[in-house]
Amino acid sequence: MVKHVVVFKLQEDKKDELDNFVKELRELPLKIGLVRSYEVGIDALRSPYSFDVVLISTYESMADLLKYKEHPAHDEFVAYMRTIVQPIKAVDFMF
């Protein structure tokens, strides 16, 4: 099993896109499949150090995660994401 964790910080002038960003992110597994579990959360504290959104997803194998990342729907989301997100940080680990 592989866990994929990503944190996103929206650009300051794009904070009004938060709800749409989360909606689009939550729809990805419906378009792609391959996902064992999928959670999307919005930061509750909203401190200056916080990221805005987190994605925690699980895949059966690294091969499934790579297929997910290479899917055209994921590519489309990434293109949209790059227009509103500052840094992202990610970690993928096997368990």
Image (spheres, helix red, strand yellow):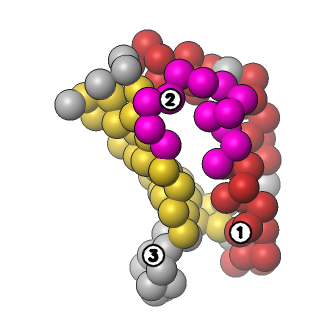
On the image, numbered disc 2 is attached to which residue? 35
**Quadrant housing residue 71:** top right
Residue 50: image tag: 3
Secondary-structure class at tag 3: loop
Residue at 47% in and 17% down: 64
Q: Residues within 10 Å of mark 2 (few under 14, many from 20)?
A: some
From this view, report whether residue 36 is shown above or below residue 39.
Answer: above
Query: 80 or 94: nearer the eye?
Result: 94
Is label 2 or label 3 in front?
2
Query: Badges 3 and 1: C-beta atoms under 8 Å apart?
Result: no
Residue at 72% in and 75% down: 15
**Which percent across, then down, holds residue 81?**
71, 50
Any part of residue 92 in sight: no
* Three-letter code, disc 2: Val
Q: Which residues are magenta?
A: 26-38
- 27 part of magenta stretch: yes
* Three-letter code, disc 3: Ser
Residue 18: image tag: 1
- 56 part of magenta stretch: no
**Which percent across, then down, holds residue 38?**
49, 43
